[in-house]
Every structure is written in structure tokens, then in C-alpha cells.
Amino acid sequence: MLHYAVVFLIIALIAGFLGFFGIAGLAAGIAKILFVVFIVLFVISLIFGRGRH
């Protein structure tokens, strides 16, 4: 999931550089959402994954 967030961030940077600001904003928004979901799932896995050894 983190990979997709980075991909959308790169798409946003390239689109912004080329002047496609609508696409850049959309891709940046998707990247933000994916990054937040990744962080939430990562924290949940840290909390609940510690009990299993």
C-alpha cells in the first residue's frame, strides 16, 4: 500500500510540473489517503502483532 502512495505522489509531482494541476491535486489526495491508511494499518499491526510469538 505504501508503494501505491509513492506512485501517486510521483504522478502528482510530474502532473504538477507539466501543468496538469487538476490531475496533480487528485493524485496528491489519493496519495495522502493511501498513506494515512498505511499508517493506521501499520500501527494496528504493531499493537496486535506483539502478542503472537
Image: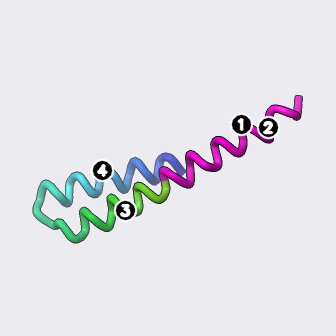
Q: Residue at x 27, y 57 (%)?
A: 12
Stretch in magenta? 35-53
Question: How many other residues sit within 10 Å of disc 1, few (<14), some (14-19) or many (≥20)?
Answer: few
Is residue 7 within the magenta segment? no
Query: What is the secondary structure assignment of the residue under circle 2?
Result: helix
The spot of residue 8 in percent (x, y) is 36, 56
Is residue 43 within the magenta segment? yes
Q: Residue at x 64, y 49 (%)?
A: 41
Q: CA distance from mark 1 to mark 3?
A: 26 Å
- The residue that mark 4 highlights is 10
In the rendered structure, which amino acid carries the disc numbered 1?
Leu
In the image shown, does 43 or 18 lie closer to the viewer?
Answer: 43
Query: What is the secondary structure assignment of the residue under circle 3?
Result: helix
- The residue that mark 1 highlights is 46
Badge 1 vs badge 3, beta-carbon distance below 8 Å: no
Q: CA distance from mark 1 to mark 2?
A: 5 Å
Badge 1 vs badge 4, beta-carbon distance below 8 Å: no
In the rendered structure, which amino acid carries the disc numbered 3?
Gly
Q: Disc 4 or disc 2, which is closer to the eye?
A: 2
Query: What is the secondary structure assignment of the residue under circle 1?
Result: helix
Q: Seen in the image, is 52 located left or right of residue 36?
A: right
Badge 1 vs badge 2, beta-carbon distance below 8 Å: yes
The spot of residue 33 in percent (x, y) is 47, 59
The spot of residue 51 in percent (x, y) is 87, 34
Q: Quadrant of residue 39?
A: top right
- The residue that mark 2 highlights is 49
The spot of residue 34 in percent (x, y) is 49, 56
- The residue that mark 3 highlights is 29
Q: CA distance from mark 4 to mark 2?
A: 31 Å
In the rendered structure, which amino acid carries the disc numbered 2?
Gly
